[in-house]
Image (tube, grey):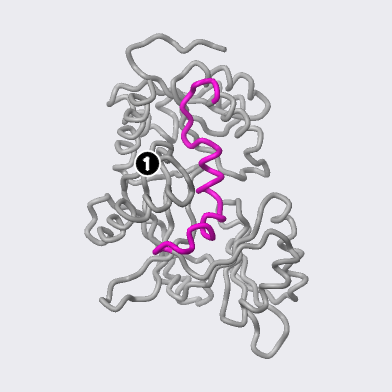
Amino acid sequence: MTGRQSSSLHSVAILSRGDAATRRDATPQNSRFVHVFEALAAVGIEARPAIYDESFAEEVREQLLAVDGVLVWVNPIQDGRNRASLDALLRDVSARGVWVSTHPDVTLKMGTKEVLHRTRSMGWGCDTALYRTAEAMRAELPARLATGPRVIKRSRGNGGQGVWKVESLPTSSMLRVLDATKDASEELTLEDFLRRCADYFETGSVIDQAFQPRLSEGVVRCYMAGDRCAGFGHHKVKALVDSPAARSEAGPRLYASNTDLRFQRLRRLMEDEWTPQLTSLLDIPGHDLPMIWDADFMLGPVQPDEADSYVLGEINVSSVFPVPDEAPAEIARWVVDRLQRRF
């Protein structure tokens, strides 16, 4: 094992994907995570870029074994590659004493769409089903479609990949399906749609949620550093929105601090109720929560007191970026606390 460098400071590597040239030229100053590097330096942590690719994985392994911790920003699916090899590497360095955030085992518990099914009884839940086989989906989806439109999601993915709005047509046996990455819907038979989803079952499962009619009003993203809110993002989306007028209102995500008055009820729910419930349900020790993660919420039914309810659409763990301006400092505080407790 490569020994860690002796220093009065803790050291971490910030790991992201890239090629050999990117690895050779990487510095904190030219990194997209420059503000995270700066925030870590401000609390006395030496941070170094660690560019990863499967072709030089052993070189990265040696680099990670020389630091106290590694902060990981790698998508589950990127450029046709998954994280299988990387996750094995991260488990290995973790077993050798390096703190890994987010650890792959935690990602599997809270960073896949299955979390929507496992937490469906919580305050953020809605009518949600889980299909582990195409046969189960064939048998159960029609009855659920009879109650209204559904959203079908592959268990692992990002960027809208493998997410569909599906609804029955009133005068036909065909289904209207809208791919979250496309602008126009199409009509398919159930069997044709199942063929579109066949690959999802090879690497995981499929989640089926009731479509939320208020989706066109926007999505609120709550950023969390461990168990504390690190800020918010809000934007109106095109994905799965049928109305051309509503689609025309879609725009970029606008960021806000964790003190923004519009989102204090959601902050309280996340910090005081939902995150403790989440860690209990998924058996995740609080100190193993990711150094940065987010939860995307759609607006649910208006409550009797006229307050909005929130419905969880997904939790992102693997590669949460960009983040609100205040988030790097929150990340740094969580990292220094974890390292001080660990070492």
Q: How many labels, in total? A: 1
Is 163 on the left or on the right of 258, as rendered? Answer: right
Q: In this view, does 8 lie to the left or right of 322?
A: left
- Indicate the secondary structure of the residue bearing disc 1: loop
Q: Give the residue at mark 1.
A: 226
* Residue depicted at 74% across the width and 63% down the height: 134
Outermost residue toward the bottom in this view: 171
Q: State the extent of the magenta-drawn residues as a range.
A: 95-124
Q: Which amino acid does label 1 sit on?
A: Gly
Q: Is residue 271 left or right of residue 316?
A: left
Percent across and percent down for residue 119 are: 48, 58
Above or below — where is 125 with respect to 68?
below
118 magenta-colored: yes
Q: Which of 204 and 238 is in front in this view?
A: 204
Is residue 306 in view?
Answer: yes
Q: Residue at x 62, y 45 (%)?
A: 77
Image quadrant in which you'd find residue 176: bottom right
Disc 1 packing (10 Å; few <14; some 14–19; many ≥20): many
Tell whether 225 sits left or right of 320: left
The residue shown at (61%, 76%) is 144
> How far from the left and from the top, in percent, is residue 90?
57, 29
Return the residue nearer the eye: 58 or 36. Answer: 58
Looking at the image, which is closer to me, 22 or 148? 148
**Residue 182, visible in the rendered structure:** no
Picture coordinates of residue 139 (x, y %)? 72, 72
Q: Magenta segment: does it hold 111?
A: yes
Quadrant of the image containing the N terminus: top right
The quarter in which the C terminus is drawn is: top left
Q: Nearer the viewer, residue 137 or 165?
A: 137
Against 194, residue 325 (above or below) is above
